[in-house]
Amino acid sequence: MTDTKEIKKTKYLNPYVGGVLLGLVLLSANFIAGRGLGASGAIKSVVVTTMTTVAPSSAANSGFVKEFRQSHEGNPMKTWLVFEMLGVLVGGFLSGAVAGRLKLKVEHSPKITSRKRLILALTGGVLFGFGSQLGRGCTSGAALSGMAVLSLGGFITMMAIFGTAFALAYFFRKNWI
Amino acid sequence: MIARLHDKKTITMGPLVTNGIISENLNLFLAFIIGIGFGFVLEQSGFSSSRKLAGIFYGYDTVVLKVFFTGAITCMLGLLFFSLFGWIDLSLVYINPTYLTSAIVGGIIMGAGFIIGGYCPGTSFCGAAIGKLDGLIFVGGLFIGVLIFGLGYKLWEGLYMAKNLGSPKISSVLGLSDGIFALLLILAALAMFWAAEWAEKKFPREEY
């Protein structure tokens, strides 16, 4: 038991140390750019770019694109979050390389097939993508960054995300445990 | 003397971009560097594994809770102290606006996405970065979800814009000073960390 625990602690960074480091990254974002971290906003840039490229005329009339344009002039891909998320890919890759975790695989519980896991991942992604737009940000942009600047909405979104996931956990337990 | 100190403050204060201390292009470059730090810390903490992330909802792995709250509190305290020392003008820092209805409904939909898909947007990029195909597919799902929101925008615009409360701070809504609220949040986090350590002992599992 003690042995398992010791192995457990060596595989990843201590979570409290990881949390402090994450907080320092978030603090530097606020100090430098006056804004927090994010993730779903970068996807929004990609979607706006796709919509304006594929169907420029209907995109020009889209309330969604207009709303985005209000706060972002110029090329929709030249935004803070797009550059930040490119960094996340590089940082995640470097960390995986250092730790020897680079491997192509589908991670899933032995109780479900890879195919089922991928369908669930796709479904979860669609829901999270949609919800992040409605909620004006995801776990990073709305919940984590919002909480750090004491935004009321940040706390509400955080509680809604984790509360719902806890409430539904029982029904999806076979996919995880 | 006080006036001179004050002058000095206004010159060197953050946020660096808003105060015109660094250029917009340098800001984008620094966004890339900050992103590298973000991705590196998430992956090092184990956030590239959906099974590890989902552990919080079953008690066998509470890394999400620990990293998330420690991170938010570290930044919150950093901002409060920076402000106290006159290093940052908090009135120039973006505070997420609160649209009550969409914050709740959006959060509920995201929560369902979390327990079904096992990732959130940032962590799915991390998973994809180290070769997790489920992470990559989740990212594809994100694109589809945002696209659906964009294409059907008119259908949910009312919901999206409802109950705009501006950008209130939770501390002011509760009638507390920022410092007192911070203290209470730290105490709440310590209680949750204690419960988390207890849960991990009670529902032990091999780590993913």
Image: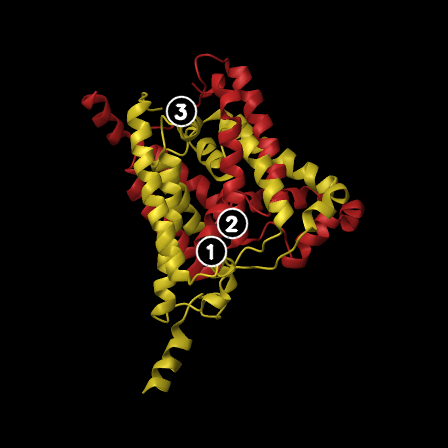
Mark before the other along the chain sequence, 3 or 1: 3
For the point 56% across and 53% down, the residue is A79
Q: Residue at x 68, y 38 (%)?
A: B147
Indicate the position of residue B23 as horizontal and vertical percent values.
49, 65
Give the labeled residue for mark 3.
Answer: A103
Label 2: how many residues lie within 10 Å, few (<14), some (14-19) or many (20+)? Answer: many
Subunit bearing disc 2 = A
The amino acid type of the residue labelled 1 equals Leu
Front position among marks 3 and 2: 2
SS at circle 3 = loop
Element marked by disc 2: helix
Which one is earlier in the sequence, the residue at label 3 or at label 2? 3
The mark closer to the camera, 3 or 1, is 1
Residue A150: assigned label: 1
Work out whether residue B59 or residue A48 is closer to the camera in this orientation and state it. Answer: B59
Q: Is residue B60 left or right of residue A156?
A: left
- Under mark 3, the amino acid is Lys
Chain holding disc 3: A
Residues at badges 1 and 2 in contact (C-beta under 8 Å)? yes
At mark 1, the secondary structure is loop
Chain B, which colour? yellow
Q: Position of residue B206 (x, y in %)?
A: 31, 20
Res B14 seen here: yes
- Splitting the image into 4 quarters, where does residue A70 fall? bottom right
Q: Which mark is residue A154?
A: 2
State the CA–CA distance, disc 1 to disc 2. Answer: 7 Å
Q: Quadrant of residue A108?
A: top left
Q: Residue at x 39, y 38 (%)?
A: B65
As rendered, which of B150 and B28 lies closer to the eye? Answer: B150
> Which quarter of the image is occupied by the N terminus of chain B?
bottom left
Residue type, label 2:
Gly
